[in-house]
Amino acid sequence: MATRGMLIVLSGPSGVGKGTVRKAMFQDQQRDFVYSISMTTRQPRPGEVNGVDYYFVSKEEFKQEIANDGMLEYAQYVDNFYGTPLKYVNQTLDSGKDVFLEIEVNGAMQVRKKCPDGVFIFLTPPDLSSLKQRIKGRGSEDMQTIDKRMLKAVDEIKMMQQYDYAVVNDTVANAVQRIENIIESEHLRVPRVISQYEKMIGVVEK
Ligand code: 5GP
């Protein structure tokens, strides 16, 4: 049987650039881990594709998934629901592959309770003004939504303490490199590799 894959959770405050960093991780790169596509009730932004960026569903469909216990986690964010379909995550982890989630902080805390052996990475802004610029720069939200996201972001930064790693998003390339380093090191942690050494240890003890 394959060793169960590792669950990697990238989270952090609104507008810090989680989506950008996640896309950069998977762009033009063969990875040993796969991205779990989230489900959302928000409208697609220009250029976003159903089944690639998100599974875009109605509120009714989303609620049905929750009722069917089909979500690993979900959260209401601003005025929409976002969640991680459970089946894909479980099947992929069972097959021995690592799964990468990019989710907001409330969802990440639900995953932390359900999967304490996951790796929890908090992406941080270098400073607050760059965060505001990012939220504004996206250009797809009105002022009221921007203010809401900004307030929420400041609140969310306090949640850093619940994570294993803090990664500064000064540049996307740096952030990606740091995340790669974390994943590589996590794979070397003794509790994750001990089963591979059991035979060797057994031989020595005889
Ligand atoms: P956006 O609308 O900008 O694509 O995403 C808004 C927020 O929802 C981001 O912080 C993003 O990380 C988060 N998000 C995306 N997918 C999920 C998910 O499956 N679960 C949760 N809890 N948050 C998500």
Image: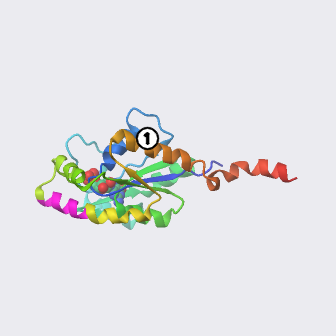
- Between residues 74 and 121, which one lies in front from this camera angle? 121
Q: Is residue 113 above or below residue 101?
A: below
Q: Quadrant of residue 177?
A: top left
Residue 97 is covered by the magenta coloring: no
**Residue reaching furthest top?**
28
Q: Is residue 4 above or below residue 115?
A: above
Q: Quadrant of residue 66?
A: bottom left
Q: Is residue 67 above or below residue 7?
A: below
Q: Which residue is pictured at 66% across the width and 49% down the height?
A: 1
Q: Position of residue 117 (x, y in %)?
A: 54, 59
Q: Main secondary structure of the magenta part?
A: helix
Q: Which residue is mark 1?
A: 177
Q: Is 127 positioned to the left or the right of 139 in the image? A: right
**Residue reaching furthest right?**
206
Number of residues whose C-alpha sits closer than 10 Å to that of mark 1, classed few (under 14), some (14–19) or many (20 or more): few
Q: Is residue 170 visible?
A: yes
Q: Position of residue 188 (x, y in %)?
A: 60, 48
- Between residues 125 and 12, which one lies in front from this camera angle? 125
Q: Amino acid at mark 1?
A: Gln
- Between residues 178 and 80, which one lies in front from this camera angle? 178
Residue 147 is covered by the magenta coloring: yes
Q: Position of residue 124 (x, y in %)?
A: 34, 54
Q: Report the span colored magenta.
A: 144-152
Q: How many marks?
A: 1
Q: Is label 1 in a helix, a strand or a loop?
A: helix
Image quadrant, ligand 1? bottom left
Q: Quadrant of residue 50?
A: top left
The scheme the figure's colours follow is rainbow
Q: Is 71 positioned to the left or the right of 115 in the image? A: left
Q: Is residue 57 visible?
A: no
